[in-house]
Structures are given as structure tokens and as C-alpha cells.
Image: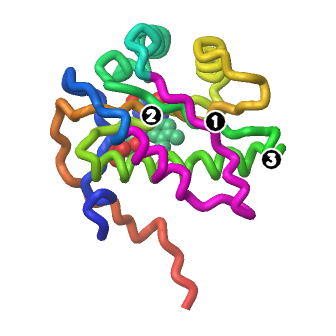
Amino acid sequence: MLKAILKRRSIRAFKDEKVQEERIKEILKAAMLAPTARNTQTWKFTVIENRDVLNSLAAAQKAMSMMKTAAFAIVVSGDRDILNDEAYLYVHSGAAIENMLLEAYEEGLGTCWCAVGPIKERMDLIKETLKLPDNLLPVGIVAFGVADEVKEDVDRYDPDKVNWVK
Ligand SMILES: Cc1cc2nc3c(=O)[nH]c(=O)nc-3n(C[C@H](O)[C@H](O)[C@H](O)COP(=O)(O)O)c2cc1C
């Protein structure tokens, strides 16, 4: 198994260390290599490095409290102007987010994926804070930074979740 898949865990405490823009660009490049239906590449990315904005998100949403120590965060949105189908916008954004989590691991960074859509309160918060245009559907926000916690490996293989057709 890929080491990044095995070792990635949600990290909610980060060290006070900056991340160079080049490393952030590598993470964005990984996101944009994700597969999309008919290669429509429906995502848009909002990179948040501003400390006040990160703090305000942490304060507004308990589930996003790790933003307080994150070095930066990326909101992944689906662009309705590219494809007017929410199901696909969610699926595409999810694939892009997972690529970011794995690339960030390779870059030596911890991550935490937080839901935005379809939770109205969180969508309103993100849209208002970042002044997103109406065509963007915010699907998720990911916190990034140098991990300040250690997580054990887990094995979640569950045979009850698998149906073999032989
Ligand atoms: C769609 C989605 C939404 C999530 N939302 C949150 C969230 O709002 N806050 C949070 O702390 N973690 C959030 N998580 C992280 C999950 O809690 C975490 O992935 C899960 O507990 C498994 O742990 P692991 O990521 O360490 O393997 C979310 C994960 C996904 C995939």
C-alpha cells in the first residue's frame, strides 16, 4: 500500500511553522490531477494564508477549530458555471481533496478535511468570509501545517463491508 494512504490521519494541532508557496503549489497541482467526469475539472481553490481569516473560521465553527494553528487552508469549491450538477461537483471536489491530503503527507505536512457543503451554516460562513461568487459551491476546507500530534496507524479493513461477486 502507498505509505501516504497508510499514514495519513486527520491532524488537528499544528506547529507554528510557515509553508513555502512552492509546496502549496505542489499540493494544488496534485489536486488538479484528480480524475473528473469528461475531464471537466470543475473545481476552484481558495488558498487562505491570512491569520485573521483562519482564526475567524476557527472561532465560528467548533468543527474547524484546528484552523487556529493551521499554516494555511484550502477551500475546494465546485463551479456550477462549468457543470450544473451538484452530485458531480461533490464527487470531483472529494477526489481533488483526497489527492491534496496524500500529496501534503508526501510534503511532510499534516491535514484535516472539514466538511462545508451540504451543511448550510458552514456554506454561508465560507461564502460570506471569502466573498465567493454564487456560481461556486463550497464542498470542503482542508487545514494544512506541520503536525504537532502523532497518530497511530490503523487498520480499518472490515470484511462485512465487502460483497464479493465470484
Ligand atoms: C467529508 C468529511 C468531512 C469531515 N469534516 C470534519 C470536520 O468538520 N471537522 C473535523 O475535525 N474533521 C472532519 N473530518 C475528518 C474525519 O473526522 C476523519 O477523517 C475521520 O474521523 C477518520 O479519521 P482519519 O482521517 O484520521 O483517518 C471530515 C472528513 C470528511 C471526509
**Which residue is nearer to you in this view: 59 or 55?**
55
Q: Which residue is mark 2?
A: 142
Identify the element where label 1 is drawn: strand
Chain-order first, disc 3 or disc 2: 3
68 in relation to 144, above or below: above
Q: Which residues are magenta?
A: 24-48
Residue 83 disc label? 3
Q: Quadrant of residue 130?
A: top right
Circle 1 Cα neighbour tier, 10 Å, few/some/many (<14 / 14–19 / ≥20): many
Residue 77 disc label? 1
Q: Quadrant of residue 5?
A: bottom left
Chain-order first, disc 1 or disc 3: 1
Q: Quadrant of residue 154?
A: bottom left
Question: Where the C terminus falls, by quadrant?
Answer: bottom right
Cα–Cα gap, marks 3 and 2: 23 Å
Identify the element where label 2 is drawn: strand
